[in-house]
Image: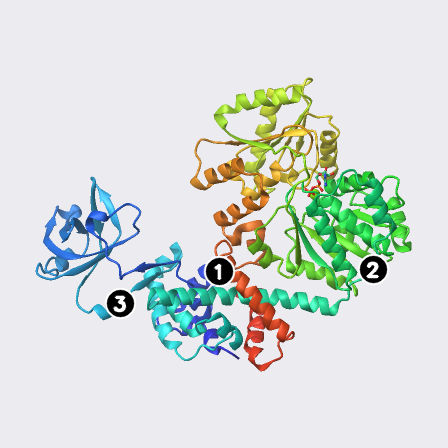
Amino acid sequence: MPNAFLQTPVEYLKGVGPQKADILKKEMGIFTYGDLLSLYPFRYEDRTKFHQIKEITADLHYVQIRGRFVSVRSIGEKRAKRMSAIFRDSTGDIELVWFQGIKWLLDKFKGDKEYIVFGRPAQYNGKWNIAHPEVEEVSDENTRLANAMQPVYPSTEKMKAKALDTKGIARLLKPLAGLMKGRIDEILPPEVMLQMKLVTREEAMSNIHFPSSQENLRKAEFRLKFEELFFIQLKLLKLKAFREEQFKGFVFSSVGARFNEFYKNHLPFPLTNAQKRVIKEIRNDTGSGKHMSRLLQGDVGSGKTLVALMAMLLALDNGFQASIMAPTEILANQHYETMSAFLAGMDVKIGLLTGSVKTAARKVLHRDLESGALDILIGTHALIEEGVKFKNLGMVVIDEQHRFGVEQRSKLWKKNIRPPHVLIMTATPIPRTLAMTLFGDLDVSVIDELPPGRKAVRTLHKYDSHRLEVFGFIREQIKLGRQIYIVYPLIKESETMDYKDLEDGYESIMRAFPLPQYKVSILHGQMKADAKDFEMNRFVKGETNIMVATTVIEVGVNVPNASVMVVESSERFGLSQLHQLRGRVGRGADQSYCVLMSSNKLSSDARLRMNTMIRTNDGFEIADVDLRLRGSGDITGTQQSGELNLKIADLAQDAQILQYARNSAGAVLNADPHLDKPENQTAKERLAELAKETTNWSRIS
Ligand code: ADP
Ligand code: MG
């Protein structure tokens, strides 16, 4: 086994008894030497730099000063007793205090010697002091430089209780770094090492913990980030290559009658250039004999549905059936209605299959699907899972499913000996780096243009104290014939607190907007599906003025007459969610508004989210800010799915390294598609090892 050393159980390390081992496992998932070595410092204290006393400010986590003791004395009585020293450099004095070990310290510091003091500055009565600093005599400059960059490790309360604070962790890693010398095998192909000018794995692992210089630290970081991203890309690209090799795609050789008829006679408006480009990309894929797996990214309202429809017509023209899968019944219904309207007067048979379709009707659908009498089937998830049989399904469109992970996607392909072309449409734009990582096995199309003539939604931020003013505005809009959404946060569908927010909100809305003048709908996750549909349909048909809801309405619903989106407690929403919600309005000809309500107390992150929403309507820009604020692990539920568990790379910052990693992985696979060459064996083994790690349930303690 390569790198057997790294598989050594962490208990074998000197200083790790059963208790510490247990804490390391539970708190950090550290089972082996390798795990411990990949607990990376999150910052470093630079011990080569000295601060001047007069320059100390509140933003410094720590300071290092070089100077002499002017006085050392004990002050106070009994419990208040402490030792106070005045330390001086060429720019001023600072007080150093100790509350323990006083007797021993009193004689320790000599006035004629030079010392280095290190610690966290604090202000007391307007003066700076440092409590319990580290003090050492200036003597051996070389050892100082060797310890130039001190690692600071993440730790938890439970770890600290077992002496596993940052220092405790460093005390374990120091000897481990010694032990590993000569025992860390290289896992990247030599070609890649050379081309990217990477330091060896061993050098990187050593320097990431105990950097011998800034330069070496930078090289170590680059190498480890590259390695992490390289193997993700290698996995994705290998999967993609495997799929393309394994499955021949159905060839849609002609653009035929129905596509052309629709384009010439039924299209209600000219396509945007972006829509045209994407349709071309789909045509190229499906005409080539390759199996299409394409991700379609486009902001809310950019017209993805129409692109999907035209892609499906391509399938029909070549003798195949097509299908579109939506995440909810409401959306499936809506697609059914939209597509039926688009195709009115054309010879295309569309069916709708959801949980609500009665047995008799379902039987007819099944029969027509198998005989080929039905061209397009629209439905929910159940569509592929229920053993629904198509005569010849050639194209599947999956709508609003950015939570569909790699694993689920591969299930889709495995279902069929010869799988249909797949077009996945995301509801929310995601930054390029994230798309490359989460959907790196797919080809990506982007609609980066909204249909002309849209009025941008105006976004306002209002404190709760201005609620009456907002209610007044809502009344005006209703008088103009518009409809209003009022959305309450819901973190988990079952959380009683959130539910209460909604109930209270609903009651206060009913009081402020009484019958018979106003009619209010309510929608939340705990309602039965048919009750939900009933309420939603009342709103869609314009029978109610206000829709009070939780985020269940977040995805996809289209009510062009709704012109105001009020988001309650908006500080509790993430940016992409806010953007999704805002996308529910601005779909008609009227000026629309998004009102973000919040309490007066806002964290700086919450304030940045508000300001971002007010500043821009561009989903891609919003996604970038979101990524920077939350980090990649947190975006779009990827943390739960465990798909993105990056230890060192940061998708918000390392776009360039990611691109290098993808290019390198692509080049390696180009030259050696199955990784058969001897020089790629270690990389191949590493891939297998990583695959095991993600599915190793025994590691969950
Ligand atoms: P999304 O990308 O969010 O799914 P939709 O496909 O629902 O967006 O499109 C939003 C609205 O824009 C729909 O009412 C649709 O009919 C309309 N639309 C789509 N393409 C165009 C276009 N090229 N010109 C004008 N309106 C368009
Ligand atoms: Mg849509």
- The answer to which of marks 1 and 3 sits earlier in the sequence is 3
Could you tell me how far apart the alpha carbons at marks 2 and 3 are, in whole angstroms? 68 Å
Indicate how the structure is coloured in the image. rainbow
Tell me if 162 is positioned left or right of 660 in this view: left
Q: Quadrant of ligand 1?
A: top right
Residue 305 pos. (x, y %): 73, 44
Q: Residues within 10 Å of mark 3 (few under 14, many from 20)?
A: some
- Amino acid bearing label 3: Leu
Which numbered marker is on residue 649? Answer: 1
Tell me if 141 is positioned left or right of 18 in this view: left
Is ligand 1 within 8 Å of the beta carbon of the residue shown at mark 2? no
- The answer to which of marks 1 and 2 sits earlier in the sequence is 2
Name the residue tied to disc 2. 253
Q: Residues within 10 Å of mark 2 (few under 14, many from 20)?
A: some
Q: Are marks 2 and 3 in contact (CB under 8 Å)?
A: no
Q: Residues within 10 Å of mark 1 (few under 14, many from 20)?
A: many
Of residue 453 and residue 499, the one placed in the foreground of this image is 453
Of residue 394 and residue 131, the one placed in the foreground of this image is 394
Could you tell me how far apart the alpha carbons at marks 1 and 2 are, in whole angstroms? 43 Å
- Amino acid bearing label 2: Ser
Name the residue tied to disc 3. 145
Q: Are marks 1 and 3 in contact (CB under 8 Å)?
A: no
**Residue placed at 12% from the left, 46% from the top?**
77
